[in-house]
């Protein structure tokens, strides 16, 4: 006998006015709604999602989390995010399945090791565990790794980040939705935002396909669609290119990989899931695309790259293959901003392929921004004006050298 199953979040009636409206039921939208309610008592909030929650990158990512980004501005944000997973698992009463198995980034040349040295120093300065390792130590961490001279790019060493790992991405979506709804937030799925109304330089409403909502605050957290919406609704141009990013999983295998392993040179990363599948991803497709189409080219690339690094995977079958959108800025760092030039309009986008690991902490600070109207210090480096002022961040440099993930 099964009991009547309880919905994780109740269906709510659509009201004609809310204190805040969030566009996008992805990781960032739901996290911001949760923290608006938890930290600021702002519970009269609507999350408007045109498909279903987790439809975007939230449900398509490869679930990798870590804190060893490159720049001084980014590391503290990602460190706090990493520390939040166990806290939120308890608080949301929802198992987010955080597995801090550690991340190993491989270096295949001196230039990459040099870039890694800078990363390790920045991480250690901020109290994040990260260290350089030699090929033998790489092999001890990942016994299946080929550290011989056979591969096209032999292993020179690596950067090991013990506290990183994997979190179950759909559990994060459902846990945040449950937590936000419990505090009074309304989640409207299957509802599309079609416009934003302004008057005298201030946000006053949001148009949806289910009617108009009056509100003084709107957060655009529409992921890969955020830049197009900002331009269509408010003629605000965001420096974002939208590229496809693909991922796939193999058939389930016996345990052989208990770290996240990645190589920027091969443009390939992978980890073994609890089901035994190797979940693997690569860099973005190299051309702006705006579709979630997958390609045969990617399958070939991924098979070659994976088996160069982990030859025991030869002959293993890929089972599923999917794609999502990566909203990438020129410096590969996100845009978090608000009240400029329109009061009450906030943006949290440009996360490319890093927006899972940072989502909860970003929600916390975007909620503070929306509640108090003042940009929190930790978010200031990510404001839009950095592009006008030619103050781009250095995240790109490190990524190009060694880290395609994740
Ligand atoms: C294949 C792949 C692998 C990745 N791997 C990783 C990883 O390992 N680690 C990591 O940190 N990040 C990873 N990412 C990136 C991460 O998934 C994204 O950065 C993250 O999901 C962004 O979250 P978001 O909330 O901003 O957007 P999304 O999760 O994309 O949510 C945006 C939502 O807005 C909705 N929406 C759009 N337009 C409208 C509208 N007009 N009205 C209402 N709703 C609308 C969409 O339907 C969508 O649900 C990966 C991404 C992909 C695609």
Image (cartoon, grey):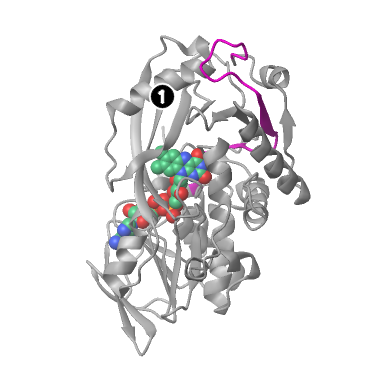
Whether disc 1's CB lies below 8 Å from ligand 1 is answered no
Going by the picture, which residue comes out furthest to the bottom? 200
Q: Is residue 61 above or below residue 40?
A: above
Q: As drawn, is 112 to the left or to the right of 188?
A: right
List the residue tagged with mark 1: 302
Who's the residue at 28% across and 46% down the image?
A: 289
Q: Is residue 4 visible?
A: no
| Displayed quadrant of residue 158 | top right
Q: Is residue 24 visible?
A: yes
Q: Is residue 264 above or below residue 172?
A: above
**Rendering coords of residue 18 (x, y %):** 40, 76
**Rendering coords of residue 103 (x, y %):** 63, 33
Q: Nearer the viewer, residue 97 or 132?
A: 132
Q: As drawn, is 206 to the left or to the right of 105?
A: left
Magenta highlight range: 146-172
Who's the residue at 64% across and 45% down the image?
A: 67
Q: Nearer the viewer, residue 143 or 216?
A: 143
**Residue 162 lies in the magenta-colored region:** yes
Q: Quadrant of the N terminus?
A: top left
Q: Is residue 344 above or below residue 320?
A: below
Who's the residue at 28% across and 26% down the image?
A: 296
Number of numbered labels in the structure image: 1
**Rendering coords of residue 147 (x, y %):** 62, 15
**Rendering coords of residue 249 (x, y %):** 42, 25
**Residue 47 lies in the magenta-colored region:** no
Please, what secondary structure does the residue beneath circle 1 have? helix
Q: Nearer the viewer, residue 179 or 68?
A: 68
Who's the residue at 51% across and 10% down the image?
A: 312
Crowdedness near tag 1: few (<14), some (14–19) or many (≥20) residues, C-alpha within 10 Å? many
Q: Is residue 255 above or below residue 192?
A: above
């Amino acid at each position: 006998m099964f009991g009547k199953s309880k919905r994780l979040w109740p269906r709510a009636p659509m009201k004609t006015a809310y204190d805040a409206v969030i566009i996008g039921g992805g990781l960032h939208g739901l996290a911001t709604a949760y923290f608006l309610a938890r930290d600021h008592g702002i519970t009269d909030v609507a999350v408007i999602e045109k498909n279903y929650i987790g439809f975007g990158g939230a449900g398509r990512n490869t679930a990798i989390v870590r804190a060893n980004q490159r720049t001084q501005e980014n590391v503290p944000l990602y460190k706090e995010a990493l520390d939040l997973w166990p806290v939120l698992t308890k608080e949301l009463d929802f198992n987010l399945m955080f597995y801090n198995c550690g991340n190993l980034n491989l270096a295949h040349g001196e230039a990459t090791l040099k870039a890694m040295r800078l990363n390790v120093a920045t991480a250690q300065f901020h109290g994040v565990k990260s260290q350089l390792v030699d090929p033998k130590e790489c092999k001890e961490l990942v016994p299946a790794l080929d550290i011989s001279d056979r591969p096209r790019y032999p292993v020179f060493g690596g950067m090991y980040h013990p506290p990183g790992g994997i979190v179950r991405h759909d559990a994060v979506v459902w846990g945040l939705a449950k937590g936000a709804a419990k505090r009074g937030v309304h989640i409207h799925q299957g509802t599309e935002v079609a416009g934003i109304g302004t008057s005298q330089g201030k946000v006053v409403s949001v148009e949806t396909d289910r009617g108009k909502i009056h509100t003084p605050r709107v957060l655009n957290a529409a992921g890969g669609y955020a830049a197009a919406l900002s331009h269509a609704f408010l003629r605000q141009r965001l420096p974002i290119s939208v590229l496809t990013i693909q991922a796939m999983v193999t058939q389930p295998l016996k345990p052989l990989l208990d770290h996240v392993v990645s190589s920027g040179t091969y443009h390939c990363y992978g980890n073994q899931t609890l089901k035994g599948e190797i979940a693997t991803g690569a860099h973005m497709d190299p051309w702006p695309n705006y579709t979630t189409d997958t390609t045969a080219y990617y399958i070939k690339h991924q098979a070659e790259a994976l088996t160069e690094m982990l030859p025991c995977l030869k002959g293993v079958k890929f089972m599923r293959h999917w794609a999502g959108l990566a909203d990438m800025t020129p410096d590969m760092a996100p845009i978090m901003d608000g009240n400029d030039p329109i009061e009450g309009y906030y943006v949290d986008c440009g996360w490319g392929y890093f927006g899972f690991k940072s989502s909860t902490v970003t929600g916390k600070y975007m909620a503070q921004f929306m509640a108090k109207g003042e940009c929190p210090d930790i978010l200031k480096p990510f404001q839009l004006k950095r592009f006008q002022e030619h103050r781009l961040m250095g995240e790109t440099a490190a990524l190009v050298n060694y880290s395609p993930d994740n």
